[in-house]
Image (cartoon, rainbow, N blue to C red):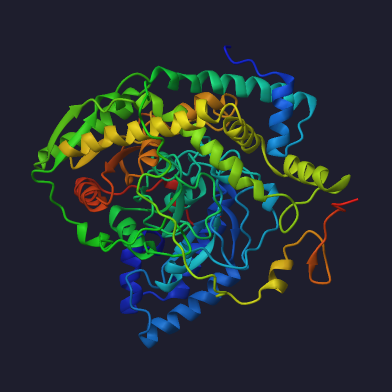
Amino acid sequence: MDIRNLTALELGKKIKTGEIGVVEATKAALEQIQAVDETVNAFVTVDEAGALRRAEEVQKQIDEGSLTGALAGVPAAIKDNLCTKDLLTTCSSKILYNFKPTYTAEAVRNLERAGAVLLGKTNMDEFAMGSTTETSAFGVTRNPWNTAHVPGGSSGGSCAAVAANECFYALGSDTGGSIRQPSSFCGVTGIKPTYGTVSRYGLIAYGSSLDQIGPVAKDVSDCAAVLEAISSYDRKDSTSLKREDCDFTSALVDDVQGMRIGIPRDYLGEGLDEEVKAAVLAAAKALAAKGAVVEEFDLSLVEYAIPAYYVIAAAEASSNLARFDGVKYGYRTEEYEGLHNMYKKSRSEGFGEEVKRRIMLGSFVLSSGYYDAYYLKALRTKALIKQAFDEAFEKYDVILGPAAPTTAPKLGESLSDPLKMYLGDIYTISVNLAGLPGMTVPCGKDSKGLPIGLQMIGDCFQEKKMIRAGYSFECTRKYEAPELAERRGK
Amino acid sequence: MANVISDETIEYVGILAKLELSGEEREQAKKDMGRMLDYIDKLNELDTTGVEPMSHVFPVNNVFREDVVENGDDRKNMLKNAPEQKDGMYVVPITVE
């Protein structure tokens, strides 16, 4: 048996029975990181000493019987926009190149309570702005399936790390598809829960009304278990919800008999790659064969989601990122004349191109004279999009479609045309605007051997229906890891 | 391009955003923003008369509580991240002449 190939829950079980030690599992992950991360670059920071220290501590607590959960002792990776006490947290930006938080994000705290061993922090698009993990100030992450291609983004490091067997699961964040799209490109499973399910305390904010933290793992069972562990009401997050139904693993049932599944015709039209379309429709057929009632319908308004999103996300980003001014932490420019010049120079030198582009756009749409025309118009559009989903969920339990129009593009092909890159988010973005849960499950590969992801969307608070559908589909196929994940030593 | 961003506008946005752009960056920013706004103008096709702007998908109310200090004094640790510090305080350039 090769420890690296186990899922998080399989490993957790073996740790519980004593078949595998926590230190042994942690070493296996660290060795894999050493073997492949020079190529993949999924990590910004690897905390080898901290992980091994923690592994011993967790093993002791398991032996004493104080840690009994399904994920106790399982090594995980965390996206670098989640604060971790005394551990470098950069958001993949030069402006936070030396930032060590004095506290840990609530979602990560919840994982620690469940007995997680943190291996390190994963690479991302700078401040989660991007779809390829190429805007990172610390180098691009490469897709483990083909290192000439991007892993997707912005949680590209988390998804690549899971695919490459560098960790057993990871946390990502999703503002417009940042968990679901890279999960699709890397052939792994990822969930963005209903807005408010996971506390955003300690998540470095991008678009606060859209941001949600979620799990990335090898399969639906792992994702359900991790989501169960990180979900909690938190009074430190004013948008946190009190939910009583976070026992997501109870939905891991292989049964879609009578489940109503809708496929938006708008998600199958122009721009969708033929091979992706074929794989998604084949998945729908597999669910229909298991007794689900599958039909196509018109969702409407799909083409308005991207412009509305970029107004809202940019507006919130311009406000959220005002805090980075070179005063209390992070990068400060070397030479300056006076306070305002110091702010301006620190920010201009510390932020990358894409971040500056969005801050500028956000400042513009919020400025006096344009606020109504752009910002309020986008919020009105958001209300209409939510309404369209509400109507769809009167008819369907789950909405199904592709996670992205194509498989992973080659490195260097996307950034030259930002608008074109934004259009790649068309199937994921409206889910964030409407606050809905969404999930990506691998459903095939294209002729280039790159993974294709199936997206499932649930109504608000209906993660369980989505998880049940995802799990039932997953039962029809076997998890496949890229060749690189099986590589041994250097 | 329907939206032409003037030098004055980009200057003004730079002040709001607290960003200083070089000549070349400025020209690029003008082009990028114009192109993005052209695309965003697509929203004008939608009739949103009478639709309330939706800032949050769920009804979120202000949560009030007593202002009680719960975390300890973490000054020493917080100052470790400061670019410049002195006598337990952050150092910044002179703000008032």
Tell me where residue B49 appears, x and y as whole percent: 37, 24
Name the residue at 44% across, 65% down: A235
- Against A187, residue A235 (above or below) is below
State which quarter of the image contains the C terminus of chain A: bottom right
Name the residue at 19% across, 46% down: A476
Name the residue at 14% across, 34% down: A294
Tell me where residue B76 appears, x and y as whole percent: 72, 73
Q: Can see residue A397?
A: yes
Give the side of residue A33 with respect to residue A70, left or right: right
Residue at the bottom extreme, as displayed: A64
Give the side of residue A176 with respect to residue A291, left or right: right
Tell me where residue A137 appears, x and y as whole percent: 66, 44
Query: Is A440 in front, or is A396?
Result: A396
Query: Is B48 in front, or is A456?
Result: B48
Q: Can see residue A445?
A: no
Name the residue at 49% across, 80% down: A57
Which of the 4 image quadrants contains residue A394? top left
Tell me where residue A445 appears, x and y as whole percent: 34, 35
- Against A168, residue A276 (above or below) is above
